[in-house]
Amino acid sequence: MKNLVLLLMALNFLSCSVKTKTEVKKPNILLIVIDDQGYADFTPFKDHDRTVLTPNISRLGKAGTVFTQAYVTAPVCSPSRAGILTGKNQFRWDKPASWGPGLPDDVKTIPEYLKQAGYHTARIGKNDLGRNFHKNDVREYPLQHGYDEFLGFSAHAHDYWLNSTEIKERTPDPYGTSALLGPLMHNMGEKSYEEGYLTDILTDESIDYLKRKHDKPFFLTLSYSAVHHLIHEVPKKYLDKFGAKEIANYNPDDMMAYGKHASGSYSAYYDKYSRVGAIKADELRNYYLANLNNLDDNIGRVLDALKEEKLAENTLIVFISDNGGSPLTGANNAPLAGGKYSLWEGGIRVPLAISYPGKIDANKVVTDYVSATDIMPTLLEAAGVKINDPDVDGISLLNPDNNRLLIWKWQKTWAVRQGDWKLTNTNENHWKSEPSVQYIAPIVDNTELKLFNVNQDPGERKDLAAAHPEKVKELEKAYQNWCDANIQK
């Protein structure tokens, strides 16, 4: 009898040991989305702009794989972020390909998939799907599409310094779509910050989240608003480092300071400093570099916290900019033409890196083209989650297809890429003022069809449409066939 008991105990121990060895530990996931970073301002790229100081972004790139031909689904933040969140081209449901695609009830998100798979999900920072701003009872609000927690703002932008209830109550127009100030949204309420800088605050809150005791794997989306307007709002030590002069913060008591009929409105202050004019075209770069350097320091703090909390070895990190660098902030997209607001390469080709110690190659550069829609399949595959949705446009980032069809639709312009070839009718007519000096103007400004070999000519300097009429017809037909089959009628 005694021998039988010992045998059963041994078998039970062996069974438990086998189970433990075969269990796959799900990774924690950190998705870092930043705003309007220039292509040449990503220091993991070999040919980056040497005036940029981002050692922590470089550190993140060296720890993993970077992609030199990564595309987002739109050249502005709201539709692009919808594409990242859903793994789909957002114009599938937003036929006008507008600034505000929203989020339909029947389109599933990354946090919804991961929450069902046992993850705790949190979003900190910017939430922007182009509709239903400042509301917490709508599908577009993070708690209504899969996130367990949210702290941030639901709009295009937020003032970097003015994050208190007190300033909101003193401002005649605290809630604009692109001109927001005041307390941050926190779950189903608000959280006021009497002092502090927004990028620092978002990092502090993220570190607090990482330091918690986690009994589940976590999915944290850290969605910074840097380096979006208002680009001049940066702590003084960073301004001094890059030789940029201080500009007074918004004050609702300065009734006429921001325009003849401003009457103390924040939107007038925002409009004044989100165009070239009050800040000269050749001055913007220093503000941008200061803003980006502060962002980099904050990313470094997050990476350090992961290491200190012994989370780094089992955390998959994705870093991406939501669209190309803005022509109004001093961003540098070289060698790409155009920038934010257009379907030239400078508007849709972005910095992207992914790291996961021991699972994804470190210090690797991938030159195959990929899409931001690929983030969802990649994360879900790592988490052991299967996607049963044939309309998902993404594929794994780890298995690029260099002959896949990529489609863009942005208002009245469109583009298509397959292999080395890109066909587009895009043009330029979008900003409120002249661009900053870093901007590379496209070779033409018209809506005629233009054909480029973007592998050999990423700057889109040589239109090959006349030389290859058969390729024009082929890609135009491929674009139309995709739209006919996939865009909701």
Image (spheres, helix red, strand yellow):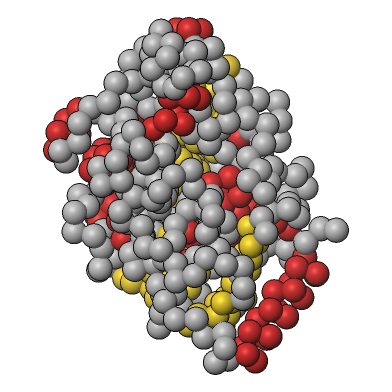
Residue 466 drawn above or below residue 66? below
Q: Nearer the viewer, residue 196 or 85?
A: 196
Residue 48 drawn above or below residue 208? below
Q: Is residue 46 visible?
A: yes
The residue that appears at 55% across and 17% down in the rendered structure is 173
Residue 475 drawn above or below residue 414? below
Q: Is residue 238 visible?
A: no
The location of residue 71, given as percent across then percent down, is 50, 64
The quarter in which the C terminus is drawn is bottom right
The residue that appears at 65% across and 25% down in the rendered structure is 135
Residue 13 drawn above or below residue 286? below
Q: Nearer the viewer, residue 171 or 466?
A: 466
The location of residue 206, given as percent across then percent down, is 39, 33
> Is 473 displayed left or right of 244 in the figure?
right
The location of residue 361, given as percent across then percent down, is 34, 68
The number of discs equals 0
The residue that appears at 53% across and 36% down in the rendered structure is 156
The residue that appears at 37% across and 41% down in the rendered structure is 276
Q: Nearer the viewer, residue 452 or 120?
A: 452
Q: Nearer the viewer, residue 361 or 390?
A: 390
Q: Residue 449, located in which quarter of the rendered image?
A: bottom right
The location of residue 238, given as percent across then percent down, is 19, 35
> Is 21 displayed left or right of 247 in the figure?
right
The residue positioned farthest toward the right in the image shown: 489
